Image: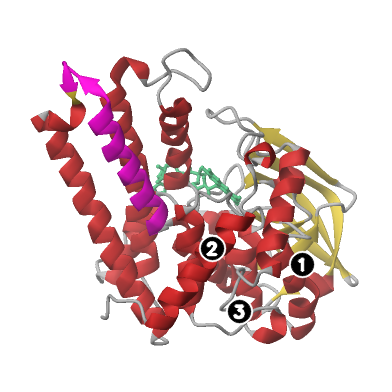
Amino acid sequence: MDLTYSKEDETFRKEVRAWLKKNLPKKDKAISDLMPHDPERVKRSKDWQHKLFDAGYVAMNWPKEYGGQDADVMRQTIVNEELTLARAPGLVGASGLTMLGPTLIQCGTEEQKRRYLPKVLTADEIWCQGYSEPGSGSDLASLTTRAELVGDEFVVNGQKVWTSNAQFSDWMFCLVRTDPDAPKHRGISYILIDMRTPGITVRPLVQMTGDAGFNEVFFDNARVPRANLVGELHQGWMVANATLFHERNMLGSTTRTQLMMQNLIRLARSHQRYGKPAAEDPLMRQKLSDLLTRVEAMKYHSYRQLTDVMHGRSPGIGAMVNKLVGTELNHDICALALEIMNSYAPLKKGAVRVIDNGTWAYEFMFTLGLVIGGGTSQIQKNIISERGLGMPKSG
Ligand SMILES: Cc1cc2nc3c(=O)[nH]c(=O)nc-3n(C[C@H](O)[C@H](O)[C@H](O)COP(=O)(O)OP(=O)(O)OC[C@H]3O[C@@H](n4cnc5c(N)ncnc54)[C@H](O)[C@@H]3O)c2cc1C
């Protein structure tokens, strides 16, 4: 594994950094000051993604014919690193870019690729993921939302839950049961649903952060054209897993974790505990070193994955390791920040004596969601032990 960047990569990084310095949304246009579902925030977020796309910094490794640049994955990695370092707003179209897009490129028809991919890139159409149901989370294949094929249309009835961003999404990639008599993995199909279809009701759910980040979605005889089926009828489980693989890869981003770790060290150096900076307390130093070691291990693991991808090898089970380690690490970093801040920890943004604007408590709650979303840690461990280590199946 070569851990150095080429001269061309370093030059490219400088270009991206200079572009970001000039083009990052100004303070008065800040996206993060607004609630995630505020229409003004959605509009500003879409404008930001469009601008980034116009500059050539979105999905650079996608094929040229679908709006990408056929660039090697290193280019997009550099852009992503620079976006994180510049604390740029997250991309509102992330589900489309990182989950639906790669899935369609892999499993979609030519017509589907040409119809949907360009608008994924520019965020003109936002996508949400309709997998989980009230009775089906970890055991996703037990889902019961029914889609009956009537002529050239599916008639969809049932309910999805925890659907992130459904309240402002234009489309949903959705798992439905099309053959109730087949074994559970073989009766599922993967369809694309226009969220403006009559018979769809979206009800936001407020989580402990105070944001309504996800929703319940109800289907009451919603009619979806058969042409919106991705892959073969009843073979949606294979398509669904392609999406899950890309999702898990996305959820374990290293740069963000490194940034959080740096912020934690800064906090430990500046915040006093028992009359001296927390970073001088031997117990705290031990906990900080433990986290720092884990961050470094994760960084090298992700370099190994990047090397695999650059050599055309699938990162395989490594993506699940990334998801498991990355999401737990982010949460543990926040937990130590709360311990350092002690009684100041629960203070919210705007409160007298609040530290770092209340970000740590917010992130502590938010990052717990990411340990669960995209498959819980327990499920990742099951998959890694069974498929990665060849251990016997659980239960
Ligand atoms: C922030 C967030 C965003 C989300 N966004 C979306 C979205 O956009 N679209 C979507 O479809 N879903 C979304 N989800 C749902 C998410 O995928 C599910 O919450 C997750 O798969 C777990 O399912 P569940 O909540 O039903 O928990 P359950 O499956 O009921 O699990 C409960 C507990 O039992 C454990 N458990 C279950 N089975 C096993 C087993 N076999 N072995 C060991 N332990 C087990 C789990 O690890 C967990 O601790 C989101 C969730 C969160 C938190």
Q: Point out residue 262 in the picture as x, y percentages from the top left corner.
A: 31, 45
Identified by mark 2, the residue type is Ala
As drawn, the label of residue 62 is 3
Seen from the viewer's position, the closer of residues 123 and 201 is 123
**Cβ–Cβ under 8 Å for marks 3 and 1:** no
Judge: label 2 CB < 8 Å from ligand 1: no
Residue under label 1 = 119
Image quarter (top left, top right, bottom left or bottom right) of the C terminus: bottom left
Label 3: how many residues lie within 10 Å, few (<14), some (14-19) or many (20+)? many
Which residues are the magenta region? 254-276
As drawn, the label of residue 18 is 2
Mark 1 vs mark 2: which is more N-terminal?
Answer: 2
Residue 265 counted in the magenta span: yes
Residue 43 drawn above or below residue 154: above
Identified by mark 3, the residue type is Trp
Residue 157 drawn above or below residue 111: above
Seen from the viewer's position, the closer of residues 124 and 280 is 280
Tell me what residue is drawn at x 68 percent, y 55 percent.
Answer: 48
Q: Point out residue 108 in the picture as x, y percentages from the top left corner.
A: 69, 79
Label 2: how many residues lie within 10 Å, few (<14), some (14-19) or many (20+)? few
As drawn, is 5 to the left or to the right of 247? left
